[in-house]
């Protein structure tokens, strides 16, 4: 079974997911194999996997093709023998899925092949070549969907966080988690620890990277935040120094049950930055932030 693959970084340090990363991501169980194919007169290793959607009662093929000038011909070679190599029932791993304590049981043998062939590749070729291949394989009941290097670039840019949410963990349940959710549902991706950190990640490196690369920083100022001498203080100092050193307008303050006196005592210059009052509610606060964050998208 596959999980989420690592993201690469461009020269500016921004997280840039690749075609391989998107191929690796899956919400379903999948098993596969490595197939050696020839392209540009040299052998390449392509990944071919069967994805099992137990709830939908179907399965489909997912293929990753390494960068080459003829990815369409490489795929054609793979699909010529796909029925024997990939989804022939006797070659499949037998798996039964269901919820413990219920009568629900679904096996891989019950899943019907949908005919979908989902392809990921960093290669970019003329769409007409993919269309020709799609017509060729249609007679075999196959349907082609290609996600190439352009797809990976556009999707990665759209998923890049527009702001880092700096907050005290004690404020998650009452406000911060809801704010992050509202912004995400508004197609405004944010760097929020619950979304961006995975078990085993280097906490300091991940946070520092987020603080440096996100174009804006939403700081949820609360009594908890102000009294915290640990991570929140370090995050605030980092982004505040970024504003000073680079002359960037980075900080967007959210006042969560704090007074002007408390904010002034914590950092007097913050009094000169227009804030949003959290008492409006997460949905209303997010609505005010979305326009600001999307007005000047980062150059990546």
Image: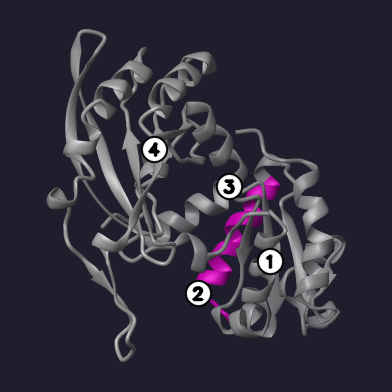
Discs 3/4, front:
4
The mark nearer the N terminus, 2 or 4, is 4
Residue 117 in the image, given as x and y percentages of width and height: 39, 37
- Part of the protein shown in magenta: 228-244
The mark nearer the N terminus, 1 or 4, is 4
Give the spatial CA distance, label 3 vs label 4.
24 Å
Give the spatial CA distance, label 2 vs label 4.
50 Å
Q: Which residue is mark 3?
A: 159
Task: Give the SS element for disc 1.
Answer: strand
Give the spatial CA distance, label 1 vs label 2.
15 Å
Mark 2 packing: few (<14 Cα in 10 Å), some, or many (20+)? few
Task: Give the SS element for disc 2.
Answer: loop
Task: Please name the residue shown 54% across and 77% down the image.
Answer: 229
Mark 4 packing: few (<14 Cα in 10 Å), some, or many (20+)? many
Residue 230 - label? 2
Task: Give the SS element for disc 4.
Answer: strand
């Amino acid at each position: 079974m596959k999980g989420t693959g690592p993201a690469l970084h461009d020269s500016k340090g921004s997280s840039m997911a690749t075609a391989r990363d998107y191929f690796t991501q899956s919400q379903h169980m999948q098993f596969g194999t490595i197939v050696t194919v020839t392209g540009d007169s040299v052998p390449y290793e392509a990944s071919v996997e069967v994805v099992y959607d137990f709830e939908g009662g179907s399965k489909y093929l997912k293929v990753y093709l390494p960068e080459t000038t003829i990815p369409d011909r490489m795929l054609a070679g793979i699909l010529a023998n796909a029925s024997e190599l990939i989804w022939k029932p006797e070659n499949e791993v037998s798996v039964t899925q269901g919820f413990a304590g219920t009568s629900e049981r679904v096996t891989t043998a019950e899943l019907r092949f949908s005919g979908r062939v989902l392809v990921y590749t960093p290669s970019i070729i003329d769409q007409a070549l993919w269309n020709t291949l799609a017509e060729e394989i249609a007679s075999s009941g196959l349907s082609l969907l290609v996600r190439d290097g352009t797809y990976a670039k556009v999707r990665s840019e759209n998923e890049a966080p527009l702001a880092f949410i700096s907050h005290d963990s004690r404020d998650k349940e009452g406000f911060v988690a809801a704010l992050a959710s509202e912004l995400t549902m508004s197609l405004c991706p944010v760097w929020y620890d619950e979304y961006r950190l995975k078990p085993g990640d280097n906490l300091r490196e991940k946070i520092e990277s987020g603080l440096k690369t996100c174009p804006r920083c939403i700081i949820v100022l609360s009594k908890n935040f102000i009294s915290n001498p640990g991570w929140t203080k370090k995050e605030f100092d980092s982004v505040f120094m970024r504003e000073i050193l680079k002359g960037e307008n980075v900080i967007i303050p959210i006042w969560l049950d704090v007074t002007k006196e408390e904010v002034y005592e914590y950092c007097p210059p913050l009094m000169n930055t227009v804030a949003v009052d959290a008492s409006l509610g997460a949905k209303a606060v997010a609505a005010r932030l979305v326009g600001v964050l999307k007005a000047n998208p980062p150059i990546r």
